[in-house]
Every structure is written in structure tokens, then in C-alpha cells.
Amino acid sequence: MLSLTSAFLPSCTFLSNRDHVQRYSSFQGIQRVAVFLQRWPVYRQKPDRNDLGEDFIKNRTYFYGSWQPAAQINPRAVDLQDIDDSPVIETLIKVLEGKGYQVILGDVLPGAAESLTADAIMAQCQAVNPQVDAFLFLYYAPTLFMSRAQATPKDHGRKSYSLQEIIQLPGPGADAVIWVGNRSQSSPVNSMSHAFIYLSMTLFKARDWQMLLEVADSQAGGKVRPWIPRCPPGPTDHDYFADAGIIQRLMLQNLRCRLGRLIPDAF
């Protein structure tokens, strides 16, 4: 009986991986990933796009480039300075390594970043790290939404705010803000409705710069998704108080959950 069970193990393993291999066949051989990351404040735009979800990052996209004031901004949106490169990179590395990839933090030549397209960055990186199998370009935008536009700081279209500043909008001394559950028009004026880290990312194969994965907000691979992956936090039946630590932790947990659903396991 023992020998019979052992004889069937290889076929069971093959069957369990068959769908994954077929669906993500282009990912075969991808293990070492170079990551390029840039923060995109909600109040800024690139010369050719108003926000990071407007289009996918392509090989001819100027990933690093000049910023302009955003032509349009959600009247309830506030850019959060609490979430910067460090926690986002840490979260991304944990997800990638958990999926079986090796992460290399990419870099560019000093002074050249203002005029480099994605393919120029990849060429530069390949010259230094020929062992890289793929390149991941990622924009991120940590954004908090007030429940009412009239409660949003007046200069939210020009600067970032800390969570503590948002919490103390009603008055000094406050240590938490109401995170509304139902997100309705009857919500308290100084409450918040959501806090979210928007993403735009593209994974390129190093050998031929083929696009393996494209994400822009709620779009993936050029097709609009009917819903954002159900990662907490979501709407609830009740309002609750949240301090800066809770808000930041929920934002990063949500990011990790979404990345985990978007990035396939390495072979």
C-alpha cells in the first residue's frame, strides 16, 4: 500500500500544477526580478497622463520624468505622507519572495532619471545585472478619502498630509478619526471613508521585454476587472474609530493582499 501511494505522488503533483503552468507559461524561467519604484502623489501628473491609473506602464513610457500639477483631483482625496518607499518596498519584497522570486532593487545612473523610458532603464540594468530575469516597474499612490469634500484640507491639491494631521482636523488633541462603514452622505463631516494605495505596475521579461503583467488601478492586462480583489478593509455596518497606526496597518495589509492575488507563483 505504501509503495502504491508513492507511485502516484509525481502524477498528483503534476496535475496540481497543470493549470498554473498553462495559465502562466510565459513566466517560466522568471526568478530574479529587478524592481523600480516611484511614488505618485495624487496632486501631481505626468506631462502625458493625469493619474497613474490612466494608462499602463509600457516599454516606451517615461517612467522617470518631470511632474506637473494635476489637472484634476478628487475633491475628497488627500495624499498621505506616512506611506513612503520603505514600507511599500518591504511589502513588495515579502510578497515576491513568498511567491518564490529573488528581488533586486533596481537603480539608474545619477542624473539620468529625468529622461529615461522603461526600455532604456531595462537596457541599463541588463548591462550591469545580466542575470536578471524580469523587470518590475511600479507607481504607487497612498490616498485617503474624507467623507465630505468640505472637510478636505484646502491645499490638498498642492501638498501631502500626515495621518496625524488628518486626525486632528476637527481640533488639536484628537487621537483617532471616524472611519465610516456605510460611506453614505449622512456620514459625519470630519470622518474618512477609505484609505487606499493605488498601483500601476508592469512586469517585463528580460530576454525580450515582453509584458508579462500589467496593472493600472482596477485594470489588469488591458481588460477592466469587474471588481477590485476582495481584500480587507471593506464596507461595514458600523462606523469605528481608527488611529494613525491602525489606518497605516490596514493600508499595507490591503496592499499585500492585492499584490498576492495579482502576482503568480514562480515555477
Image (tube, helix red, strand yellow):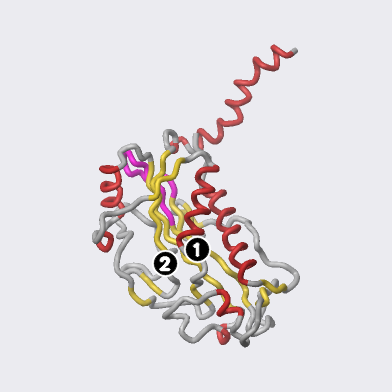
Task: Specify whether 80 is left or right of 29.
Answer: right
In this image, 55 relative to 230: left or right?
left
Q: How crowded is mark 1: few (under 14 residues within 10 Å), some or many (20 or more)?
A: some
Q: Which residue is depicted at the point 61% across and 62% down? A: 249
Where does residue 131 sit, x and y in percent of width and height? 34, 37
- Marks 1 & 2, CB-CB < 8 Å contact: yes
Closer to the camera, 35 or 52?
Answer: 35
Q: Mark 1 points at which residue?
A: 198
x, y (%) of residue 208?
Answer: 31, 40
Task: Please name the residue shown 44% across and 63% down the image.
Answer: 53
Disc sitting over residue 126 in the figure = none
- Residue 153's place in the image compared with 209, above or below, is below
Based on the displayed image, in which of its 4 quarters is residue 132 positioned? Answer: top left
- The earlier-in-sequence mark between 1 and 2 is 2
Q: What residue type is labelled 1?
A: Tyr
Q: Is residue 205 inside the magenta stretch?
A: yes
Screen quadrant of the N terminus: top right
Q: Is 122 drawn above or below residue 162 in the view shown?
A: above
Residue at image coords 65%, 18%: 8
In the rendered image, residue 202, in percent from the top left (x then y), is placed at 41, 52
Q: Mark 2 points at which residue?
A: 40
Mark 2 Cα shell of 10 Å, populated few (<14), some (14-19), many (≥20)? many
The front one of 82 and 58 is 82
Q: What element carries label 1?
A: strand
Please name the amino acid that badge 2 sits on.
Answer: Trp
Cα distance between the residues tagged 1 and 2? 9 Å
Residue at image position (29%, 54%) is 108
Relative vertical location of residue 163 with respect to residue 109 in this rendering, above or below: below
Q: Main secondary structure of the magenta part?
A: strand
Label 2 secondary element: loop
Provide the residue span drawn in magenta.
201-213
Task: State yes or no: residue 77 in magenta.
Answer: no
